[in-house]
Image (cartoon, rainbow, N blue to C red):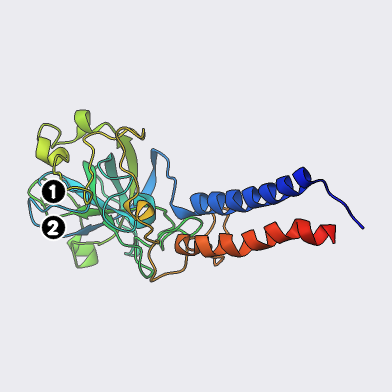
Amino acid sequence: MLSLPICSRSWLSLCFLTLICALFSTTARATEWIDYPDTGTATLTHYTLPDGYIASCGASTQYPTAAMSEYAFGSSTAYGPSCGRCFKITLMDTYLPDPPFIPNVTKSVVIKVTDLCPAGGNGWCSAKPGKPNQGGQYINFDLAWPSSSIPDDFFPSNKALYGFTDFGVWNVSYQSVDCLENWEGAKNAAALGSVDDGSSVCCPANPTGSANDTCPSFSDDNGIPPDTATTAATSAAGTDGASIPSMRDLPLLLYSLLVPSLLLPGFLLD
């Protein structure tokens, strides 16, 4: 008959439980949101917002603003870690027309992220870790345009060749920039994100990524899962289609694994 000291049995249960908790905790953190670099490429679409509208982050859209695709934004509702970040976006070429339209002028705009673009379905904001959108990108910026803060001719076109002027989707390059030095609304406190509505809004003036000036994920803090209209997030290693447990199910999963871990030492002693 196998005999284990009492202390060994206790440590066996504790180690087993700790391993389980670490496994689920690490998996959830690693697969939940997209960790994007400060510079890169993305797709760009546009949507209509009224001037002065207060979007998800709680800041005004009086100056150049954009929504960011959900899994890069970092929350499925309200505010997320990307709220308030500023990016210089430069048009490269169009995605949908054949042949692609390549402008002969360089057009750029510095935007502030004030809204999220939902990931439902297979739209341009549907990218998840390990699964880019249909343009092969992990970020989509949805520019608030037309806008009084952005010229009407910001998007170049060639109507004679294509028969229309709005290409809908652009390939762009982006660069994270300092809001206070580069964004048009930097001297307007309300536009920078001074709107305060308790726990429902968050938009730092110039987030740097530190805990002191970056919004948390509202959906993570409130146990709200990512977009439920699509498959669960997958790992960045490319295991497309492999889903992870919802954080709402975590207590039940841990309980179901805790019981065997506590019974295992007794079984070994018998």
- Whether residue 245 is visible here, answered yes or no, is no
**Residue 61: which disc?**
1
Q: Which of marks 2 and 1 is nearer the N terminus?
A: 2
Q: Position of residue 91 (x, y in %)?
A: 28, 47
Considering depth in this image, is 231 or 153 the residue closer to the camera?
Answer: 231
Residues at marks 2 and 1 touching, judged by CB atoms closer than 8 Å: yes
Q: How many labels does the image show?
A: 2
- The residue tagged 2 is 49
Q: On the picture, is 233 further left or further right than 97?
A: right
Residue at the far front: name it: 6
**Which quadrant holds the C terminus?**
bottom right
Is disc 1 placed on a helix, strand or loop?
Answer: loop
Give the image location of residue 223, x and y in percent.
Answer: 38, 58
Quarter holding residue 82: top left
Q: Quadrant of residue 48?
A: bottom left
| Image side of residue 234 versus residue 57, left or right | right
Most foreground residue, 251 or 39? 251
Residue farthest to the top, as pictured: 181
**Is 116 situated above or below 15?**
below
Residue drawn where x is 65% and y is 49% of the image: 19
| 43 vs 7: above or below | below
Front residue of this view, candidates 93 and 5 = 5
Residue 132 position within the rendered picture, expressed as x and y whole percent measured from the top left: 45, 58
* Residue 142 makes an appearance in the image: yes
Name the residue at 68% across, 47% down.
15
